[in-house]
Image (cartoon, rainbow, N blue to C red):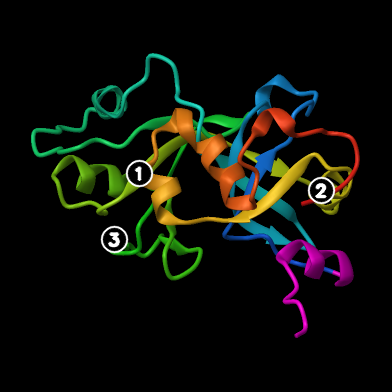
């Protein structure tokens, strides 16, 4: 029986393979403290513009969703179960992006796939404050980006592992558990056994 090719296999044998909708899981020894033990959701990836993603497991220190609403003078009496505020990456750290379930949509909402959408306008904040926003969501400040070909080179050099994104990991797992949970999805039960030198999963 012919073995089904993994996403990594396909990416290594094709001129271009989009990773939009996938997770990057940082390997030990990444060499950049901003990305140590990070899980990144890639929401855009094209051969012309490179890749853009959101770190989904780094809480923003001393910043809550209610704090952001207060700063924007948005009343939030109807807010229930506010989403976490995360440090999405080192680029445009004052810009908020909301990754959410597809049950919510505006004219500016971008569908990543049939399970995940992205909205970056204040409309969603007003709706969430009124209790009419998406069922599941997280808010990130900033994002991570790679120029054309950069992410592919980093993957080839064993900087990142790739795994599929599921809604439980994105929205339900505590932030502190997401790196280990993502590694388990790849098939690595003991992170301490990982080596950053050579090889791929």
Q: Of callouts 2 and 3, which one flags the residue occurring earlier in the amino acid sequence?
A: 3
Between circles 2 and 3, the one closer to the viewer is 2
Q: Which residue is outermost to the front?
A: 1
Q: Which residue is mark 2?
A: 155
Q: Which residue is outermost to the top?
A: 62
Q: Nearer the viewer, residue 88 or 180?
A: 180
Horizontally, is 9 left or right of 25 in the view?
Answer: right
Q: Secondary structure at mark 2?
A: helix
Look at the picture and state if 107 lies above or below 171: below
Look at the picture and state if 184 lies above or below 179: below
Can residue 71 be seen here? The reply is: yes
Can residue 120 be seen here? The reply is: no
Q: Which residue is mark 3?
A: 104
Q: Secondary structure at mark 3?
A: loop
Q: Position of residue 70 (x, y in %)?
A: 24, 24
Q: Estimate the spatial distance between the alpha carbons at disc 2 and disc 1, rounded to whole Å.
A: 27 Å
In the rendered structure, does residue 144 fall within the stretch colored magenta? no
Which residues make up the magenta segment?
A: 1-15
Q: Which image quadrant: the N terminus? A: bottom right
Q: Of callouts 2 and 1, which one flags the residue occurring earlier in the amino acid sequence?
A: 2
Q: Position of residue 52 (x, y in %)?
A: 65, 48
Horizontally, is 65 left or right of 138 in the view?
Answer: left
Q: Estimate the spatial distance between the alpha carbons at disc 2 and disc 3, rounded to whole Å.
A: 33 Å
Horizontally, is 54 left or right of 169 in the view?
Answer: right
Q: Position of residue 169 (x, y in %)?
A: 45, 47
Q: Which residue is outermost to the left?
A: 77
Between circles 3 and 1, the one closer to the viewer is 1
Q: Position of residue 88 (x, y in %)?
A: 54, 35
């Amino acid at each position: 029986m012919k073995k089904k090719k993994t996403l990594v296999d396909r990416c290594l044998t094709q001129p271009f393979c989009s990773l939009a909708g996938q997770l990057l899981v940082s390997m030990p020894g990444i060499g950049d403290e901003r990305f140590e033990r990070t899980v990144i959701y890639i929401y855009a990836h094209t051969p012309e513009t490179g890749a853009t993603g959101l770190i989904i497991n780094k809480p923003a220190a001393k910043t809550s969703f209610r704090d952001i609403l207060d700063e924007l003078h948005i009343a939030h009496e109807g807010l229930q179960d506010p989403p976490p505020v995360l440090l999405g990456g080192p680029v445009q750290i004052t810009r908020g992006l909301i990754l959410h379930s597809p049950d919510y949509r505006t004219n500016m909402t971008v569908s990543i796939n049939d399970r995940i959408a992205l909205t970056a306008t204040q409309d969603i904040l007003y709706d969430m404050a009124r209790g009419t926003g998406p069922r599941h969501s997280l808010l990130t400040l900033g994002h991570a980006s790679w120029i054309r070909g950069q992410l592919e080179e980093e993957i080839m050099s064993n900087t990142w592992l790739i795994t599929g994104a599921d809604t439980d990991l994105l929205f339900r797992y505590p932030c502190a558990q997401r790196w280990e949970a993502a590694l388990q999805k790849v098939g690595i039960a003991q992170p301490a056994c990982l080596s950053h030198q050579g090889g791929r999963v």
